Image (spheres, rainbow, N blue to C red):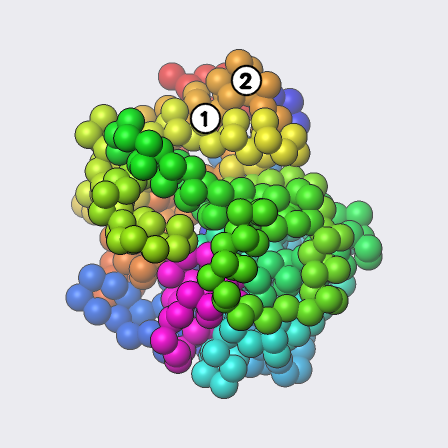
Amino acid sequence: MSEFFWGNSTSSMQTEGGWNEGGKSLSVYDIRKSGDQVSDWHFANDNYHHFEEDFDYMQDLGMNMYRFQISWSRVIKDGDGEINEEGLRYYDKLIAALRERNIEPMICLYHFDMPLHLAEDYNGFTSKKVCAAFIRYSQVVIDHFADRVKYWITFNEQNLYHTPEAFKIAGYTKGDQTLTELYQIAHNVMYCHAAVANYLHAKTTAKIGGMLAYSQVYPATANPQDVFAAHQIDEFLNYDLLDVFSYGKYSTAVIKFVQTQKLPVEYTEAEMKEIAELRSDFLSFSYYSSNTIDASKIPADTAPNLYMDWGATANPALKSTEWGWQIDPLGFRDVLNKIYQRYHLPVFPIENGIGVREKWDGQHEIEDDYRIDYHRSHIKAMQDAINKDGVNVIGYLGWGLIDIMSSQGDMEKRYGVVYVNRTNHDLRDMKRIPKKSYHWLKKVIHSNGKDLS
């Protein structure tokens, strides 16, 4: 695996902190309150002040890529106002620090943190005005950074906007969460992705791809109803987007569903033209676990987008984390194959990891053999996809490999090979402490994946 990317992925709100510094305006996360098992989002792991130290760890590990998010609220006041030059300068320094360490930057433009003004006044991505604001913001960022950043994605885990999760991550603040609204958000987000990707291709030599949250879904039994439900989930939540990313057109099955359900989704000829012109340089995804679907639990006439809300069931063949995420490295290999063998574009898994509750006693190294086992088994599965199946995989990025808050704001659910000394309600000293897995991962990366012992 020559010229292979090994690295780390994060989001801004889970990592940066500095919520009221550097001219940053408010996002929806900045007003969320803490709770018994969740932190507020104001400090995260304080990467805003610690990025040089964190990048030193990445360099020592041998990483050659870091995928991070530009905060829309940090760069554009209130999401649609003036450009915040101080915000751009912050990311200038961050990118320069990466390049000094021979770490390739990869920019994600949106990771759920809608500017508060656009959420409260326009209801997020239900609004065409928010689409216009996002495209403008993205063009500002591309114009400023594309000479130094060659790899891009627009939306983190874009297929989540095709599920009820969309109402949590799209800046949606009011409404009845209807199926029409869900499909409107999904289309608006896809139009935004296409417009931004087409702009980047027209203006730069940088590369861009779509990104999914790809969870392998198995039928609970050999019952054809279960098998068909699993296929429908793949078609509506994965292939529909991959078809657009690769060919510039929605899935025929999804188009037919919208027509038969008479969903009044608003779209324009200009939007469809942007989508038709879309192409991808790679296809990327996150992978953590697999799921299983029991069709008997799904009410009649339920949209496939909602099947998992009703029919998800545990797979007795797999072990689970304490959050019920089922560990399935073979599923990872299968997903790599399903994407590549169907679309024949380079495949890039840019999130993978295991979240576990961990505490540091202030003296001894954390013995996280479970994390070593998890990453070893998934890297082996990836290598099988490459060496046995012929899949063109261009890199492997772990998620939050220096501890960050979970997507729900829980600092105790840790993914990192480096411990960050804070809890949900005590910031402590934010000290970085390598775990046992750090030394193992360093050996893996420095051997380009040959030494997994």
Vertical comparison of 179 with 400: above or below? below
Question: Judging from the image, what secondary structure is the residue with disc 1 in?
Answer: helix
Q: Kindly identify the residue that appears in the image at 39 percent across and 29 percent down.
A: 331
Which residue is more in the foreground, 334 or 374?
334
Viewed as shown, does residue 278 lie left or right of 153? right
Q: Which residue is mark 1?
A: 333
Question: How busy is the neighbourhood of tag 1: few (under 14 within 10 Å), some, or many (20 plus)?
Answer: many
Question: What range of the chain is rendered magenta?
Answer: 161-186
Q: Quadrant of the N terminus?
A: top right
Which residue is more in the foreground, 190 or 138?
190
Vertical comparison of 443 with 82: above or below? above
Q: CA distance from mark 1 to mark 2?
A: 9 Å
Q: Kindly identify the residue that appears in the image at 59 percent across and 31 percent down.
A: 342
Q: Kindly identify the residue that appears in the image at 38 percent across and 24 percent down.
A: 330
Residue 35 point in image, percent of width and height: 21, 69
Q: Quadrant of the C terminus?
A: top left
Which numbered disc flags the more N-terminal residue, 1 or 2? 1
Vertical comparison of 134 with 222: above or below? below
Q: Kindly identify the residue that appears in the image at 63 percent across and 58 percent down.
A: 193
